[in-house]
Amino acid sequence: MLAPPRSGCYAAALAAVAFSRPRPRCSSLFQHRSLAFSSRASLCFNLSSGMEHFSTKGSTDKNKGLVEQLKQYGMIKSAKVAEVMQTVDRGLFVPEGSPAYVDSPMPIGYNATISAPHMHATCLELLEEHLQPGMRALDVGSGTGYLTACFAIMVGLQGRAVGVEHIPELVASSINSIKRSAASSILNEGSLSVHAADGRKGWPELAPYDAIHVGAASPDIPRALLEQLKPGGRMVIPVGNFFQDLKVVDKNDDGSVRVHSEASVRFVPLTSRAAQLQDY
């Protein structure tokens, strides 16, 4: 596992500079669900120091301040994404004592992390048109449940947000976090659920999905997830081994798919529970 960052986005910038592939790119700080756009690395120095300004305020103000900073530096462009990230307090989804409102991934145990806020924003913006009220969303490798909660807020009570995580302990803690969040009523009404299962197989019981997000890298796009993507739907998934690309997969009405690369990234493999916990 790579060493933890020394100071939030400062380390993100170092990691991004060290990753030298010639495209808009990302580089991981941790070896699970972690991304940092090198094109934004220079902004991270200011963003990290800016977050300190909010350290004495209440959690709601800190979360709002984080979102405002991300907007200021162009990391959030969508008003809807800004609104949902202000509504779902990131501080409820990180381990106690972690600096929740800094733009950096955080370890959450079990060789897993919660992604940096700007990466959550990126994925939400890529999927926004497929997270409209009444739609269905699948979050593979849901971890803390933060992004699943955001999906639930966006699709609402008439929609369905499903998280799949193969670490049962993370499933339990994510449900507890969601219960304390703005998405609690959606959980209680049954329009949001989190399941302990192998995310590579998706969650066919509630398919098809308008939006699918995958939080770990697969050698290729899993057939099960393609089959569960609704015609007209979109999937965001990192694909590759050592060199990986964040792929955007759009399924046409006739069932064919169009795929493009959004950025170069580094994620740990989409793998089994046993493999993830091997050195834990």
Image (tube, rainbow, N blue to C red):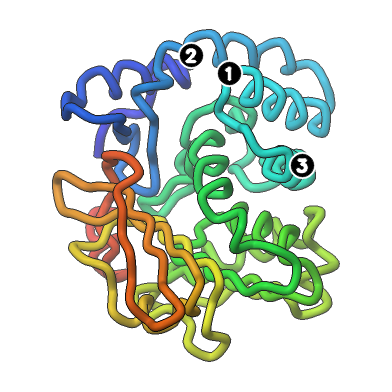
- Helix, strand or loop status at disc 1: loop
Q: Looking at the picture, how far across and down is residue 249, in whole percent?
A: 37, 62
**Kind of residue sitting beneath label 3:** Glu
Q: Give the residue at mark 3.
A: 83
Residue at image position (59%, 63%) is 130
**Kind of residue sitting beneath label 1:** Tyr
Q: Nearer the viewer, residue 101 or 79?
A: 79
In the image, farthest residue toward the front: 254
Mark 3 surroundings: few (<14), some (14-19) or many (≥20) residues within 10 A: some
Q: Which corner quadrant of the image does residue 2 belong to?
A: top left
Q: Which corner quadrant of the image does residue 172 belong to?
A: bottom right
Q: Looking at the picture, how far across and down is residue 203, in whole percent?
A: 48, 82
**Kind of residue sitting beneath label 2:** Leu
Which label is found at residue 197? none
- Side (left or right) of 20 relative to 77: left
Is tag 2's residue or tag 1's residue first in the polypeptide sequence? 2
- Helix, strand or loop status at disc 3: helix
Which label is found at residue 43? 2
Q: Which corner quadrant of the image does residue 259 belong to?
A: bottom left
Q: Looking at the picture, how far across and down is residue 277, in whole percent?
A: 30, 61
Is tag 1's residue or tag 3's residue first in the polypeptide sequence? 1
